[in-house]
Image (cartoon, rainbow, N blue to C red):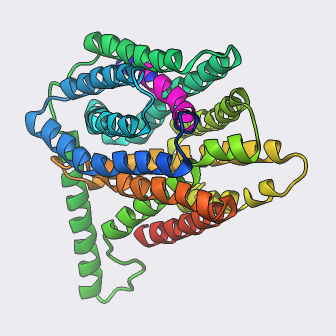
Amino acid sequence: MWRLGFFFHEMAFGLLSVFLPLYIVTVGGSLIDVGIMTATALFLVIPASFFWGYVCDKTKRYKRYILLSFFTTAVILYLFTFTTSVSLLIILYALMSILHVAHEAPKNVLIAELYSHSEWEKAFAFYEGFTEIGWLFGLLLGFAASTYNLNSGTMLLLCSGLNLTALLISIFLITDPAMIFERRLVSIEKTIDFTYKGVILASKIMDGLKINGKLRRENIDAFCASLILFSLATSILFTPLPIFFSKILVLPTSIIFAIYALNSIGGVAGYFMASNNSEQWTERMHICKIVLARSVLTILLIPVLYLPTGNIVLATMILTLMSFAYAVFLVRTLSLSMELIPAGKAGLFNVLTGVGSACGSFIGPYMAQTLGFAYVFMMASVLFLLSYIAFEIFT
């Protein structure tokens, strides 16, 4: 039940994800303004993620930072309704992002500490699937609001109210873990397992036996590089995408929300598939193949620019499959990050993804405005391919 507050929080950001880029353009901004706003916010989020991850582990208090995130987000979204200045909106969005990320590391730690290591992937999958439903409801709310032509101020008030609801629910449902030890136990287990394998191999060598395997630690640098490249490609692709649907395919706002809702349904399916059968999905459908699939699907978006008919259907199908693939990738990497990242550095996962997202959120809109969306799709596809190579090295 403690996840219920996050459901309403994600509902607000599902609505905001499509509405805000369109709103910036509506009040006189450009694609580059959207890129500057998103990139500025995400670059500021990088040190903020380090800070919130460190301070929550240092104090062993997690609930307070989740409440802080929800409260400040609700307040700043309310302040959005008092201005249409693009510069001021960028400043407010950057401030909101710094405070918004305060809930990310505590949320990851709560899952890691409330469940045993063997249940981590299933727990992360269930959390992400549950909150993705909230994101979907936010998109459907945006679809309904745009259908009934609600004004921008009302849309922003809806987002603010949903975060306020998340705050009130979380006050009563979230409690800090009584004991913090699961991540340390996993670290000890991994060290002992590596030592044991080393002793077995050494014994075989001394006895003159044939060696069929080799002693190998995970390549942490490759894991970090894969995360950065994956988030960079995702941000390059998705940051300007609402404008692609609005200006290139000339779709009304309600249809754009509907497309994103179908995309979100693909994510929900991916999360719950991983939740119900976590081990099979991480072994049988190897995570590297998931990343490679994102690369292929991205390049398939290029024909959408040139097809006379059916381009909307094709784009929707591709995005839905990409969302499914993203869900499986996120569940696996979140679980791995809790194994690899030591206590006190819980914000590192968000930092790594934030570095890629920050760069991509400016590069994507800039490329779209100066070179065109075909170059955006090609660049994102190449970066997904590089992420696939890095993850192959890690595994």
Q: Quadrant of residue 219?
A: bottom left
Give the residue drawn at x 61%, y 34%.
264
x then y, percent, for residue 257:
66, 30
Count of numbered circles in the view: 0
The answer to whether residue 286 is left or right of residue 204 is: right
In depth, the one of 88 and 205 nearer the eye is 88
Magenta span contains residue 174: no
Q: Residue at x 28, y 86 (%)?
A: 205
Q: Quadrant of residue 252?
A: top right
Residue 132: in sight, yes or no?
no
Above or below: residue 330 compared with residue 125: below
Identify the residue at image location x=57%, y=62%. Answer: 367
Which quarter of the rendered picture does the N terminus lie within? top left
Does 101 sit left or right of 281 as displayed? left
Q: Viewer-proximal residue, 62 or 94?
A: 94
The percent position of residue 38, horizontal first and vertical second, equals 43, 46
Picture coordinates of residue 88 (x, y %)? 36, 35
The single residue placed furthest to the left in the displayed view is 59
Q: Residue furthest bottom?
A: 208
Image-based side of 274 in relation to 149, left or right: left
Residue 36 visible in the picture: yes
Q: Main secondary structure of the magenta part?
A: helix
Q: Which residues are magenta?
A: 8-23
Q: Position of residue 90 (x, y in %)?
A: 38, 40
Residue 74 in the image: above or below residue 377 = above
Magenta-span inclusion, residue 17: yes
